[in-house]
Amino acid sequence: MSEQPVRKPRNAKVLEVQRTERLSPHMIRVVLGGPGLAAFTDNDYTDHYVKLQFAPEGVTYPKPFDLDWIRENLPREQWPVSRTYTVRSYDPDAGELTIDFVHHGDEGIAGPWAAAAKPGDELAFMGPGGAYAPSPAADWHLLVGDESALPAIGGALERIPVGTPVKVVVEVSGPDDEQELPTPGDAEFVWLHRGDAAPGTTDLLLEHVAAMEFPSGKVHAFVHGEGAMVMKKLRPHLFKERGIPRDQVSISGYWRHGRTEETFREWKSELAEADRAAAAPA
């Protein structure tokens, strides 16, 4: 009988909450650290993201955290719930990794966790991944999104080359949700306020971007946020009406109004399949 290969456990990094900060009415910053941070390997992307693992209430897991073991040995209702979040910043010298959470009351899983987080709480995650960083070869940059994209937009702004023009368009609930986002670039900010409308239910981003006068030269764009707005409205506008080459745009939905992350992934798969079918020769 041949030997069975030994499975390498998918051990998540387990970090400890160092402190939290309320950045705005709908954004909470959680700074993580502890010995587990030594296993974190940074990458060169400004949209680098991690898969946070939230245990159901009352469930604890053996250490080290092994996602494969959990799925093989525990019932599905005890599996962790995964949520994808952008790393806002990573400071290896200080031993800190910062994640900003959108918080809309008791809605969702990650936001309420962040609102209740206290020093010493543990959080496991897998990653990081990522795909985008501002190109130094671009003549100007376009950064568009809702509050879910603010951490990635903030990270990108810090990497814009000195003096390079950058137009930033962000939709938030109101003036209190605006943030100071430093950049060495020559930035023009537009904050769009949806008021009492639910996130992901307005056309504010599309209307503003469609009315913009784009500078001449090569643009590098980062456009992320609510799925239907980004993929069904902004994407056709940028590619078809503006004629921007696809390799100059990082564009994707971060979430979908009315869907959990699990059903959002299904929606993105269906959208990708429809795109492939439309592009196939007749």
Image (cartoon, rainbow, N blue to C red):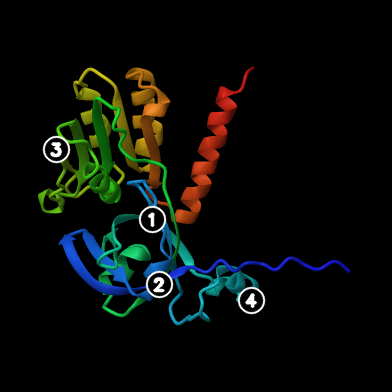
Q: Secondary structure at mark 1?
A: loop
Position of residue 261 measured from the top left corner of the image (x, y, whole percent): 45, 55
Q: Residue at x 56, y 66 (%)?
A: 10
Mark 3 vs mark 4: which is more N-terminal? 4
Q: What residue would you read off at disc 2? A: 36
Residue beneath disc 1? 42
Q: Which residue is mark 4?
A: 73
Residue 18, position as x, y percentages in the image: 26, 74
Q: Where residue 226 sits: x, y (%)?
A: 35, 44
> Which of the pair 264/89 is nearer the observer?
89
Which dot marks residue 94? none
- Residue drawn at (29%, 68%) of the image: 95
Question: Distance between the Cα atoms at labels 1 and 3?
Answer: 28 Å
Which residue type does callout 3 highlight? Phe
The disc, 1 or 4, on the residue closer to the chain's N-terminal end is 1
Q: Determine if residue 202 is in view.
A: no
**Any part of residue 144 in sight:** yes
Residue 22's place in the image compared with 151, above or below, is: below
Tell me if mark 3 has few (under 14), some (14-19) or many (20+) residues whose alpha carbon lies within 10 angstroms of its own. Answer: few
Element class at badge 4 = helix
Three-letter amino acid code at disc 2? Gly
Q: What label sits on residue 189 in the rendered view? A: 3
Q: CA distance from mark 1 to mark 4?
A: 31 Å
- Looking at the image, residue 277 lies above or below residue 30: above
Q: What's the distance in space between the residues labelled 3 and 2, CA to CA?
A: 37 Å
- Apparent side of residue 199 relative to residue 70 in the rendered image (left or right): left
Few, some or many residues within 10 Å of mark 4 (<14, 14–19, 20+): few
